[in-house]
Image: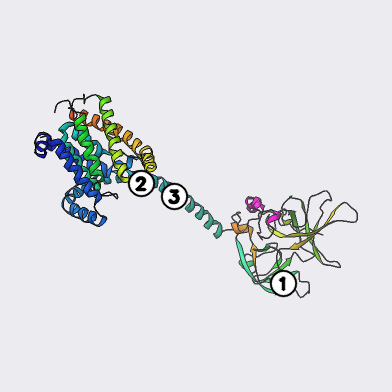
Amino acid sequence: MIRNLLFRRPDWTVFIVTSLVCLSLILLERRAQERVVWFLQHTVLAPAEFAAGWMERGVGVYWENGRLRQRVATLQMEVDAMRAERGENARLRRLLALDQRHPFALVAADVSGRSLDRLGGSLTLDKGEEEGVTANRAILTPEGLVGRVERATAHQARVLTILHRDCAVAARVARTRVEGVIRWDFGDQPTLHLLYVSSQEDVKPGDIVVTSGQGGIFPEGVRIGTVDRVALEPNGLMKEIVVTTAVDFRGLEQVLVYTPGTAEGVAPPDLLEEAAPADSSAVPAVDPEAGASIGASAAPPSGTVAP
Amino acid sequence: MKLIRDSLVLLVVLSLQATLLYRIEIGGTRPDLLVAFVVYFGWMRGPIPGTLGGFGVGLLQDLDASGPLGMNALAKSVVGFLVARAGFRVHRANVGVRFAFFFAALLVHDILYYAVATGGDGGEFVKQMFVKALPTALYTAVATLLLLGVAERFTRRRLLTDET
């Protein structure tokens, strides 16, 4: 019967034998299966794996190439964008460097002397006319306005601070652009006042007061101080506004002299005024809206408002 | 000549299965061109080559599989044998017949494969049949017909003919 099966139905024989071998392999223990696999892998499969690996590398390179082309295109776009930004950055840096070289044509000066008066009100600087410090130049610090040069010699200058009764400054409230005059009021309680503001105007405590630029001595937008109190005058027509100075005059040792004759008329970024009461913690010194007009405001020195 | 041609087809199929097919995976399903090759081989060469070819290809697959050794070999041997026995007199050039044969053969293969793999767990077997076997059979049948069409157009001769 087996002989008949082998010779008359060889296909069935092969099929049965093959199936039995397969079943035997399936039923082998795992360790025995691993040995069979190891043997076959190192004899039968090695050439096939070599061929498959060769194809994998070839085809893989093709796919990898496609992916890399896509990646290169994406990166190229990024590089172009970054290149454009770098150009813009360089351009802005050049502008900034220009500004920093000639921001206001500011001259730094040391405070060499102070007023003998206990309230202060005047300073003596170690720079004079030969250094470009002449009469009616504005004196600033990064914190804000200090005052103006009253008179100057070759190497010295006398400064009237805004705490001096003879130094009045045209000013405005940064938030509402309400204008007035800042003047030191020597009374029972010496304070800085914003004068000539109508009772109808919108001024609140916390508002920042800056120079208005009118008159030409003081550049527009320089911070003077912050509104401390707002009340109505006894006549009811004007507001009584008390301003706290931005500059600490007690510790003043160095100042900047504004020399508009050589100014470029552009404010440095760190001095730009945000002009918002909520940001009153910052102490910028110049109103950005005034930046363009600073250079043009080199008019005759009439900024000092007579009391 | 036939041996060389079949060897080349097997080499191409092995290469495609090892390199390209995972890139066209759809929802975790990819064509099993090795089963398709066994169907083609058994169909064209008869029961004994089909059985032995199925055994060889299946064993090759088992060497790289995580399941028990011999599972693929058994399934492909049976498929090679059955296809050769059943498809001897059918019209192989017809696309519908080709699709039905490949699809049915792939289902038989997966029935055997998952019957062993699930170890008699009926629920798991049914689940695997619906989740894996049917999509794979469908995808493989379609992919095989496309590949056959491309290969026949390229070589300008039918790879699956009625002649034996």
Q: Are marks 2 and 1 on the same chain?
A: yes
Q: Is residue A61 magenta?
A: no
As rendered, which of B89 and A242 lies closer to the eye? B89
Disc 1 is placed on an element classified as helix
2 or 1: mark nearer the eye: 2
Tell me the distance, in whole angstroms, between the alpha carbons under discs 3 and 2: 15 Å
Q: Amino acid at mark 1?
A: Arg
Q: Residue at x 31, y 35 (%)?
A: B137
Q: Are marks 3 and 2 on the same chain?
A: yes
Query: Badge 3 is on which residue?
Result: A82
Give the magenta range.
A272-301
Circles 2 and 1 in contact, beta carbons < 8 Å: no
Q: Earlier in the sequence, mark 1 or mark 3?
A: 3
Q: Position of residue B74 (x, y in %)?
A: 23, 42
Q: Chain of mark 3?
A: A
Q: Amino acid at mark 2?
A: Val
Q: Chain of mark 2?
A: A
Q: Position of residue A213 (x, y in %)?
A: 70, 54
As rendered, which of B136 and A241 lies closer to the eye? B136
Query: Badge 1 is on which residue?
Result: A250
Q: Residue at x 85, y 66 (%)?
A: A187
Tell me the distance, in whole angstroms, between the alpha carbons under discs 2 and 1: 62 Å
As rendered, which of A39 and A160 lies closer to the eye? A39
Quadrant for the N terminus of chain A in the image: top left
Tell me the distance, in whole angstroms, between the alpha carbons under discs 1 and 3: 49 Å
